[in-house]
Amino acid sequence: MIARAMVGWRNPARYLAPLALAAAATATYLIVHRAVEHKHASPPAPIVQTTSSHARSGGHAAAAKAKFYVVQPNDTLSKIATRTGVSLSTLEALNPSINPDALHPTQRLRLRP
């Protein structure tokens, strides 16, 4: 039974339940939106990765470094050559299997032999 004090008053649950539902829906939307936004975020500035291998000859360690460039959106071979200081002909010679007209982001290009 409804208490006499509640007569004429509206039950507070009638207002709180829709508010709680709206808050839960908003929180879910924000969490999903941030996850999707983070997944599709563009990579930061051009990435130049350096790998090194150590070769021993006569007891002395010699470090041979091979450098690679990771292609960014809207990169061309001439832009990459200018940015890295490697000539265009050297880039083409070190990467014979690439099509200069069809570079893809995240594609790796060799900069040094």
Image (cartoon, rainbow, N blue to C red):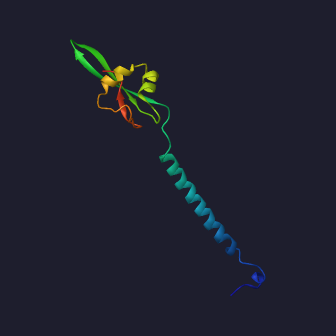
1 relative to 70 in the view: left or right: right
Query: Would you say residue 11 is visible in this rendering?
Result: yes
Camera-nearest residue between 113 and 12 = 113
10 vs 3, nearest the viewer: 10
Q: Specify the quadrant of the image occupied by residue 109.
A: top left
Quadrant location, the N terminus: bottom right
Q: Residue at x 58, y 58 (%)?
A: 27
Decide: is 15 above or below 105.
Answer: below
**Residue located at (39% from left, 35% from top):** 103
Tell me the residue at 50%/35% (across/down). Answer: 44
Q: How many marks?
A: 0
Indicate the quadrant containing the C terminus: top left, top right, bottom left or bottom right: top left
Name the residue located 43 percent from the left edge and 25 percent from the top edge.
78
Residue furthest out toward the front: 101
Q: Is residue 100 above or below residue 23?
A: above
Q: In this rendering, is residue 81 above or below 1?
A: above
Q: Quadrant of residue 50?
A: top left
Left or right of residue 41, residue 65 in this image: left
**Place of residue 33 in the rendered image (x, y in percent of width and height, measured from the top left):** 54, 53
Q: Is residue 52 visible?
A: no
Q: Which residue in the rendered view is the most extreme toward the bottom? A: 1
Instruction: List x then y, in percent, for residue 34.
Output: 54, 50
In front of the other: 83 or 31: 83
Q: Position of residue 28 (x, y in %)?
A: 55, 59
- Residue placed most toward the observer, 12 or 57: 57
